[in-house]
Image (spheres, grey):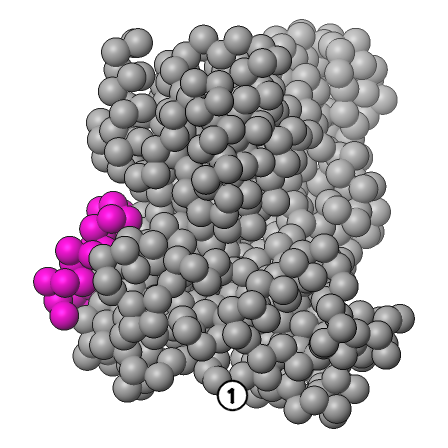
Amino acid sequence: MSIFIDRDTRLVVQGITGREGGFHTRQMLEYGTTVVAGVTPGKGGQKFEDTVPIFNIVADAVRSTNANCSVIYVPPMAAAGAIFEAVDAGVPLVVCITEGIPVMHMSRVMPFVRSRGARLIGPNCPGLITPGCSKVGIIPGNICAPGRVGLVSRSGTLTYEVVNHLTRSGIGQSTCVGIGGDPIIGTDFIDCLRAFQEDPGTDAIVVIGEIGGTDEQNAASFVKEKVTKPVVGFIAGQTAPKGRRMGHAGAIISGSSGTAEEKLAAFEAAGIGVMRRPVDVVALLKSRL
Amino acid sequence: MNLHEYQARALLKAAGIPMLDGDVASTPTEAESIARRLGGTVVIKAQVHAGGRGKAGGVKLARNPSEALDHAAEILGMSIKGLEVHKVLVVPAADIASESYLGLIMDRETQRPVFMVSSAGGIDIEEVAAKTPEKILRLPVDPTYGLLPHQALTLAFALYRDFNQVKAAARMMEQLYTVFTGNGCSLAEINPLATTPAGQVLALDAKIVIDDNELFWRPDLGLLRDDTAEEPSEAAARRANLSFIKLEGNVGCVVNGAGLAMATMDLVKYYGGEPANFLDIGGSSNPEKVISALKIITSDPNVKAILFNIFGGITRTDDVANGIVAATRQFKVKVPIVIRLTGTNETTAIKILEAVGMRALSDMDQAVEQVVRLAREAA
């Protein structure tokens, strides 16, 4: 079992003929993801690698292939439009990998996504993977293994670091979700925690947060009230200075709010096992499973 | 990207927001002639990206042009929180009857622009927000519809009783919203929003922060960036498309990915060291980026040892290895380098490094412990 994606996921890739889109589509196909279509305006009728049909418009791809999930690799200036298009075509799950979308664009996208009842993951995220089954995005498949620990993270490579520790210690994952490092994102920690709590295939949850905003604090309250499965967590940015954007547009301590200490304290108060180092994930999980 | 006050004023003025006439000067004589043109008492304000300008002596009253000349000469070239003042704003000193706060931010929680107004103006709004949040009216705007007339009125009535002032303020709310959305702002603030004894509503000070992601297709806004207001190494990093922040420690860090970069800094601290920087070389790293990164880090004399922490996903670790080898051929790196790499193409990467006598570790903790020890030994 898993959350958000599984064997029935039928993927359309927006920006399939681009450099990133093409590279990662090959990786996803290799991993076993059911990629049913690609979209690049002007290249409709062609095929990607002689196998995946390309369409001009997402709605055409959905009509012809019954795609139920989209992944977006288009450049930042076209990415908000690509999300609108996928949601407008009725795609229920849209994963946006693109980094660098202006926050103003996202503030226009989100009311539309919600009004259509769709789920957006990202933007500026590595996507998600249900090991041994399907991956949508850019998380390297070889570091993951099927299992029963769910993982949700605001980061990319830090997620790989933690997943790698898990896999090498024989702890497999139900689903790993990268929710993205931007200030406005479609799916937050709570959405993932709720899904993992309800997923019979998940026994424990790893939460990887970072400085900036109050998402981790809200997640901690949710864990305290609604999550009965063991949760362990990590917060990156304990040594980050105030007022500076640490790479991710969302990773910024404003005033005295959004600090790592504040978030770690919220985790501890909610009974979440706090990892001081990424490697601690293994021992902490083993002690709680 | 932060704008200077004089730049923010220009954007507000273009939108029709009423404010006092004023101008920016780079020399004392320029300041003097602006003061002469404005007449009467003026305020000379340092243009730097730092709070607490007044307390640092960067804001001064001048009763006549010759005082303006003297004060500008004192302020220009002075250093406020490590930033040198290159420009001063000269504006008439206003008679103030009341001071309010008016701000518009892109709010993460509601995922939309949120107006904040408070009749407790002219002071640190963050402090008001923390201590007496009830004194601030917050109003989220759905960007699909924009600021609606009744919303603008609601905000204005929270500040003023006099209906003429209410109408003037409501109009300014709409103008500020236009500035905010038209320039990709993450913050647009008028503090104080003042009334004069004659009843006029005026913007006296302005602060604007532009979302860095907007600059890609708004090169006109990018031109407003003041390179001299940045740490030189940070400006160099930005030109090389690296995400870099200089810190005070002695362990240089080169990492791929922002989250892992922060976690690496934290781990340096965990093992008793102090990171010298935050540096994310990004996803698809070509060797050139690694060379730029090493140049920037080695230019910091505090750096006693350098750590590479690369988890290959999209980033190919062999690209990074090639970059390290090329960089060390181009210029001599005088401090020890510890390399941790794992993931995509790591076998090739290790061979590339071993061919020039360098070693690569695969474990993050081991690498951080080692680099912290080397930095301590060299210090």
Q: Is mark 1 on a helix, strand or loop?
A: loop
Residue ID at (53%, 25%) = B324
List the single residue furthest toward the right: A42
- Dot 1 amino acid type: Asp
**Residue B370: quadrant of the picture:** top left
- B325 or B23: which is nearer to us? B325
Q: Position of residue B227 (x, y in %)?
A: 68, 25
Residue ID at (38%, 63%) = A144
Residue ID at (67%, 72%) = A13
Q: How crowded is mark 1: few (under 14 residues within 10 Å), some or many (20 or more)?
A: few
Q: Position of residue B138 (x, y in %)?
A: 51, 65
The C terminus of chain A sits in image quarter: bottom left
Count the labels in the image.
Answer: 1
B247 is higher (above) or lower (below) than A289: above
Q: Where is residue A190 in the image (x, y as percent from the top left)?
A: 37, 73
Residue ID at (68%, 62%) = A21
**Residue B241: quadrant of the picture:** top right
Q: Where is residue B199 in the image (x, y as percent from the top left)?
A: 69, 51
**Residue A176: quadrant of the picture:** bottom left
Q: Is residue A172 visible?
A: yes
Asked whether A287 falls inside the magenta stretch, the response is yes
Q: Which residue, given by chain and number where applicable, does mark 1 sit on?
A: A8
List the single residue furthest toward the left: A287
Q: Main secondary structure of the magenta part?
A: helix
- Left or right, A117 with respect to A204, comes to right
Q: Is residue B63 visible?
A: no
A222 is higher (above) or lower (below) than B1: below
B14 is higher (above) or lower (below) than B373: below
The N terminus of chain A sits in image quarter: bottom left
- Left or right, B325 with respect to A232, comes to right
Q: Give the range drawn in magenta.
A: A261-289
The chain carrying label 1 is A
